[in-house]
Amino acid sequence: MVNQNVVKAKKQTGRPTVYTQKISDEIVKRVSNGETLSVLVKDLGLYQDSVYAWLKKHKDFSERYRQAKENQAVSLLNELLDESKELKNDRALAVRVRADIVRWYAGK
């Protein structure tokens, strides 16, 4: 005789998450240092969609990532300033385009 009052747990579907504190720390550190998410997820063997899902699910990670993005903007600005100090005429246009990209990105 089977007990009808027992509720079976719903089976999880999809891939299991690989989110760990170590991975989130690595993402935050590398983004803070100016690395783009698209580059680092390839290096870590992750999917961008997974990281975006983690940002929605893990509030602490989301807040640290937001701060990392602000730090990233400062890192990119510092790189641009350093590059402009040693500017040669043949690189002026490239630096200007990069500055426009950083300005646009910082406004987001």
Image (cartoon, rainbow, N blue to C red):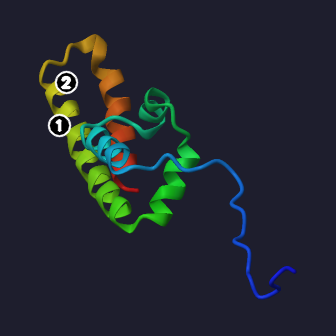
Q: Nearer the viewer, mark 2 or mark 1?
A: 1
Element under disc 1: helix
The amino acid beneath tag 1 is Asn
Q: Nearer the viewer, residue 15 or 104?
A: 15
Give the residue at mark 2: 83
Which quarter of the figure has residue 85? top left
Residue count near mark 1 (Cα–Cα under 10 Å), binned few <14, some 14–19, many ≥20: few
Q: Residue at x 39, y 39 (%)?
A: 101
* In this picture, residue 77 sits left or right of residue 37: left
Q: Determine whether 5 is above or below 77 in the image.
A: below
Q: Residue 100 in the image: state x and y as whole percent.
A: 36, 39
Residue 81 placed where, x, y %?
16, 33
Provide residue 12's location: percent of width, then percent of height: 68, 60
- Can you give x and y, in whole percent of width and height, for residue 92 in the image? 28, 21
Q: Among all residues in the image, which is located at the extreme bottom?
A: 5
Along the viewing direction, whichever of 63 and 80 lies nearer the viewer = 63
In the rendered structure, the answer to whether residue 103 lies left or right of residue 38 reads: left
Amino acid beneath label 2? Glu
Residue at image position (21%, 45%) is 74
Q: Is residue 5 above or below residue 42?
A: below
Left or right, 46 with reference to 84: right
- Disc 2, SS: helix
The residue that disc 1 covers is 78
Of the two numbered discs 2 and 1 on the same chain, state the one appearing first in sequence. Answer: 1
